[in-house]
Amino acid sequence: MISSVKPPGKGGLAAETKAGRRRVLEHFRADHGDKPHATSQAPHMQAVMLQIDGSANAKRNWLKHVAGMFIFAEETGLRVDNPCRGFKRPKPPKTDGFHSWTDGEIAQYRAYWRYGTMQRLVMELAVETSARRGDVTRLGPEHLSNGRFEFQHNKNGVDVSFPVSAELQAAIGAMPNTNQSTFLHTKAGEARSAKALGNDFREWCDKAKLPDHCGMHGLRKGCLRIMAEAGCNILELQSRSGHLTLSELQKYIDKADKRFAADRAAEKVIEHKAKQETGRKIAA
C-alpha cells in the first residue's frame, strides 16, 4: 500500500522542482494509495498515464515523477522492478520550445517600461543574467561585487560570475534605495514568488503590446542568442547560462542569426588570404 509520499531522491533538486514533484505524487497517492504497490505492473501505469489531462509533455512529466518514486522503491528493496518501464511514452510534437526574444521585442518592452520601474528591472535582470525565473526572484545586492554579478543557478548549483552591463546597472541604480535583501519584492517588503512573478510579467508584456509568445524564460534564451551573435564560444555561453552540457545549451542558441557568424567567417578568410599574400611576397 502507498501510505506516504517521499521526494524521489535528494539529487540537488531545486525547492520549486521538489514541490512540483510532491504535488504530483500526493495526487497519485490520493487516487491510488489504497492499491498494493507490489503488484502494480507496466500496463497499469500506462493506463493511468494515458488518463492524465493535458499534452504529451504533461503525461511524460507525470510519468517521470511517478517513476522516481518507484526507483526509490527499487533502491530500498520494496520492489524488484519499476512498473513505469516497458512501454512507450507519448511523443510530443516537434517544437522550438520557448520563444527567444528578438532585439525588436526587447526594445519594445524597454520603450514602454522605463528605468525606475520594477517591470524594467525584472526584464533587465532576466535578459542580462540568463537566470531562471526562480533565481531572478532571489537576486539582490549581495550578488553584486566589484562591478560583477555573482550567483549560483539553483537548478544545478553552477556558479557564475560576469561583469554587470550598463543597462542592468542603470536599471538597478534607478530603483529607490531599500534595505531589502532582494531586488524584487512586494509592496509589503516580502520576497516575490516565482509563480506570481510569471503571472505579473505576462500582464506587463500585454501592456507593452508584445505577442503572447513573449515570456520570462524566453529572455533567458534571448540572452544566449545575443551572446552567440556576438561571437561568444560555447564555454563563454556556459559561463553565463550554467548549462552543464552542449546538448542542453544547443536549443537556446539555435535562434541566433547565423549571418553574424557568416560575416565573422568572411572577415577571417580575408585576413587569412592577406597573410598568405604577404608570406608569398616575402618568400619571393
Image (cartoon, rainbow, N blue to C red):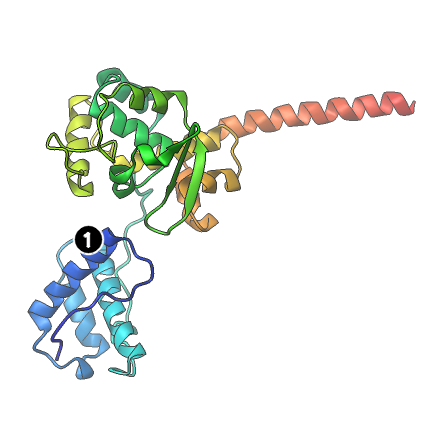
Position of 164 relative to 45 (above/below): above
Crowdedness near tag 1: few (<14), some (14–19) or many (≥20) residues, C-alpha within 10 Å? few
Three-letter residue code for mark 1: Ser
Relative vertical location of residue 196 with respect to residue 109 in this rendering, above or below: below
Q: Residue 87 at x, y = what percent?
A: 28, 71
| Residue that lies at the very extreme toward the right in this rendered image | 284
Q: Outermost residue, front direction?
A: 179
Quadrant of the image occupied by residue 113: top left
Q: Position of residue 232 (x, y in %)?
A: 51, 33
Tell me which corner region of the image, top left, top right, bottom left or bottom right, holds residue 275: top right
Residue 264 image offset from top left, x and y in percent: 58, 26
Can residue 99 be seen at all in this image of the molecule?
no
Q: Residue at x 51, y 26 (%)?
A: 260
Residue 155 visible from this viewpoint = yes
Front one among 215 and 51: 215
Q: Is residue 284 left or right of residue 89?
A: right
Q: Is residue 280 left or right of residue 94?
A: right
State the residue in front, 189 or 6.
189
In terms of depth relative to the viewer, which is nearer, 276 or 190? 190
As helix, strand or loop, the secondary structure at mark 1 comes to: loop
Residue at image location 18% in from the left, 33% down from the top: 185
Q: Which residue is mark 1?
A: 55
Q: Quadrant of residue 103?
A: top left
In this view of the protein, which residue sits in the foreground, 273 or 239? 239
